[in-house]
């Protein structure tokens, strides 16, 4: 059977580290983990005019993380932390393509900032800087390398995520200073860290609309691949049925 094609959003930068000119980027393991889970992938430049074409082309959407934040004005707040750093063009693109994907019931998976993006698209809000909001022994911006785990998450047994991983605990990495605060419409929390921070969300009225705060593309926990395989499986079922 045909493998599903997963569209992966890109980070974009103007810093002159890679090139003297503006550039797109994504870690290789976003693609390699999708391929290991059974899919093909294509990276999506942040072109608002191409969104409808992209959505006709792909069978699932992966919204990646990045070292930036969603502008708080989008979820009705002023900037409350000096740690907030935004990328207007990338956010506008990811917001628009994610909203259209959700409206079409196209499988969508948000990783780290991608999880936060899904929550905001569906009307939710964010904790702008976790240390200002919640005192915790967990450093959600872990000091150890990103390809290592740093804390446990508890999986909600009444969630689709639990159906996919069949476990109450996962040992995950952590690379975020923001988190979901108020859940968006028809969303439930499917995972929490030990300090009560929401670590995963899912839409109860969609076939696959899930976000996690950690980075399963690193395949650290044995159950990370199960999440990706479930995303691929449901994207495969959508082939030829996109509406």
Image (tube, rainbow, N blue to C red):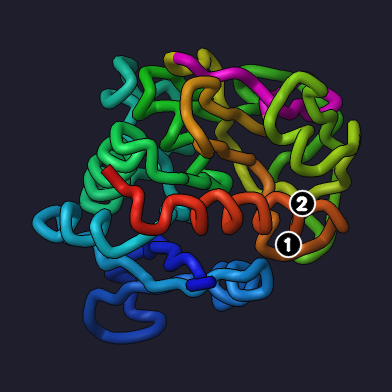
Q: Regarding mark 2 in the picture, which secondary structure is present there? A: loop
Q: Residue at x 51, y 58 (%)?
A: 236
User: Front-most of 141 and 25?
Assistant: 25
Q: Position of residue 150 (x, y in %)?
A: 85, 49
Q: Residue at x 34, y 61 (%)?
A: 58
Residue beneath disc 2: 173
Q: Is residue 99 above or below residue 223?
A: above
Q: Residue at x 72, y 65 (%)?
A: 218
Q: Is residue 25 above or below residue 82?
A: below
Q: Where are the magenta residues, as a range?
A: 186-198
Quarter of the image with the N terminus is bottom right
Furthest residue in direction left, as rendered = 49
Answer with mark 1 or mark 2, whichever residue precedes in sequence: 1
Prevailing secondary structure class for the magenta stretch in the rendered image: strand
Q: Are marks 1 and 2 in contact (CB under 8 Å)?
A: yes
Q: Residue at x 44, y 63 (%)?
A: 6
Residue beneath disc 1: 146
Magenta-colored stretch includes residue 133 = no
| Quarter where residue 76 is shown | top left
């Amino acid at each position: 059977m045909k493998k599903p094609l997963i569209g992966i959003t890109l980070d974009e930068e103007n810093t002159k580290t890679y090139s003297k000119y503006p550039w797109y980027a994504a870690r290789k393991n976003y693609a390699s983990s999708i391929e290991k889970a059974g899919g093909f992938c294509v990276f999506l430049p942040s072109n608002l005019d191409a969104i409808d074409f992209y959505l006709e082309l792909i069978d699932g959407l992966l919204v990646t993380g990045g070292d930036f934040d969603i502008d708080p004005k989008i979820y009705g707040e002023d900037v409350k932390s000096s740690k907030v750093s935004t990328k207007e063009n990338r956010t506008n693109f990811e917001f628009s393509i994610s909203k259209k994907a959700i409206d079409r019931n196209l499988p969508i998976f948000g990783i780290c900032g991608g999880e936060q993006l899904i929550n905001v698209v569906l009307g939710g809000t964010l904790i702008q800087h976790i240390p200002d909001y919640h005192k915790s022994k967990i450093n959600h911006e872990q000091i150890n390398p990103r390809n290592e785990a740093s804390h446990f998450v508890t999986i909600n047994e009444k969630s689709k995520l639990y159906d996919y991983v069949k476990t109450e605990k996962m040992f995950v990495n952590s690379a975020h200073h923001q988190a979901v605060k108020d859940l968006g419409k028809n969303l439930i929390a499917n995972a929490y860290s030990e300090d009560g921070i929401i670590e995963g969300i899912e839409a109860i009225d969609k076939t696959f609309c899930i976000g996690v705060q950690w980075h399963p593309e690193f395949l650290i926990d044995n159950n990370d691949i199960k999440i990706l395989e479930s995303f691929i499986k449901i994207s495969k079922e959508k082939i030829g049925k996109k509406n």
